[in-house]
Image: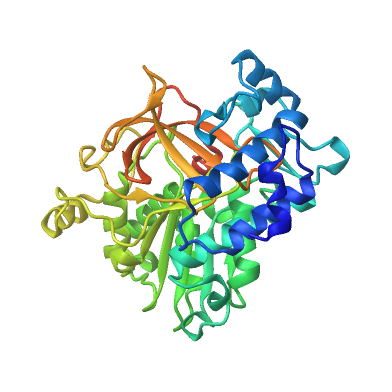
Amino acid sequence: MKTARKTIYQSAPKSPPAGELDACIFDFIARGVERHSTDAEFGSLALALFRHQFALNRPYRRYCELLGRSPRNVKHWKQIPAVPTTAFKDAELTTLPPRQRTAVFHSSGTTEHRPSRHFHSAATLALYEAALWPMFASRMLELEPVAAVTDRRYSNCRLIILTPTPAEAPHSSLVHMMETVRRRFGAPHSAFVGATALEDGRALAAAVHSALRTSHSAFLLGTAFAFVRLLDAMATSRRGRGLQLPPGSRVMETGGYKGRTREVPREELHALISAKLGVPRSAIISEYGMCELSSQFYTGGEVRSPGFSRQSQSRVMAAWEPAEAGTPNLARDAAGSAVFRGPPWTRVQVINPETDREAGDGERGFIRIFDLANRASVSAIQTEDIGIRRGDGFELIGRAPQAEARGCSLMVPS
């Protein structure tokens, strides 16, 4: 990083200016996702960001003071207090004055629950968009971000996005992410299927079928529940039965099912997508994100599970029937083992809820994320998601019991 910007790392416990922080975070992101950041590099910027948020984010400062934490005694990034995601429902956890707030992301797609609120300014929204693109390009395209927009393999690639449109979901961080990718990368006629098609499985299958009237490859991006609805419709629709993605196509699924009528384990869902849509397992990627974060986590390539062979895949295919209320879930014990990893400007811990200490490798607990791209809110987020620590990543188990469903899993109407 540039020498002129190193001063914020070494300063006394005072808040560095927002503009200097943004410049340092942009520099961090510009180094790319393949270059590992040292603990010292990450920690220096994390502590500077903590000083900034402690000074300007009043609800967060009160929370830290209740814990007896401040920039004077927090000397390592692991000591930075993590805020539960539920706190975003009750408080305006932001460093931004109201006049600077140009966008807000909500967590919920329903009116039954109070949504989390993550406020952004024009500057932090630019930071959010800068952070999402390198990981998408690296994991979905297996390319450097600059090459991703010029590589001839993807020059005619159409994006088919299984979510509402930006106009229909203006406060969805997932939809904003998809729109950012569409603007930067998608070929002409890339589009969202929209809320109307998502309400009806057959309409969804028809929308995807119509979008695939091309010999060029396509990227199918959507929530896990949208894919389940699409697969259900394909099992009963004459048009859906013949639906196949062109060679070179890829799939990204995200989100969960909590509170929905049909759940399919990730490993099983990927097997079905592969078999029904003609996409290799290595071309199916899972994404993990939330409105309280500014960075995303991805699996890499094919999901491997010793208990899920080609023979078991064929048994699942034979059992796949249209979903009905009360239908038992298929192969609930066929848990996937995909490992999610984030970019160098993030860190992940899996926290033992009984000891509040970091779990060992292979142990489960609650996922805690440190995200340097969260400049205007809180960099340390304690999620309600349960995971297993896998080196520098995590295997996602699911939501904690009684936790509210996230917006991405509620984005397809029941």
Q: Return the residue nearer the eye: 244 or 72.
A: 72
Query: Where's residue 385, x and y in %?
Result: 43, 33
Q: Return the residue nearer the eye: 193 or 287.
A: 287
Q: Is 43 on the left or on the right of 12, as rendered?
A: left
Q: Which colour scheme is used?
A: rainbow
Of all residues, the one furthest to the right in this rendering is: 99
The answer to which image quadrant residue 118 occupies is top right
Total numbered circles:
0
The answer to which image quadrant residue 335 occupies is top left
The quarter of the image holding the N terminus is bottom right
Q: Is 195 on the left or on the right of 317, as rendered?
A: right
Q: Which residue is drawn at 58% across and 25% down?
A: 86
Query: Where's residue 206, x and y in %?
Result: 48, 65
Query: Where's residue 39, x and y in %?
Result: 48, 46
The answer to which image quadrant residue 362 occupies is top left
Q: Specify whether residue 300 is in view.
A: yes
Vertical arrangement, residue 260 with respect to residue 103, above or below = above
Q: Specify whether residue 106 is in view.
A: no
Of all residues, the one furthest to the left in this rendering is: 311
Query: Where's residue 57, x and y in %?
Result: 74, 29
Q: Return the residue nearer the eye: 8 or 29.
A: 8
Q: Residue at x 54, y 63 (%)?
A: 134
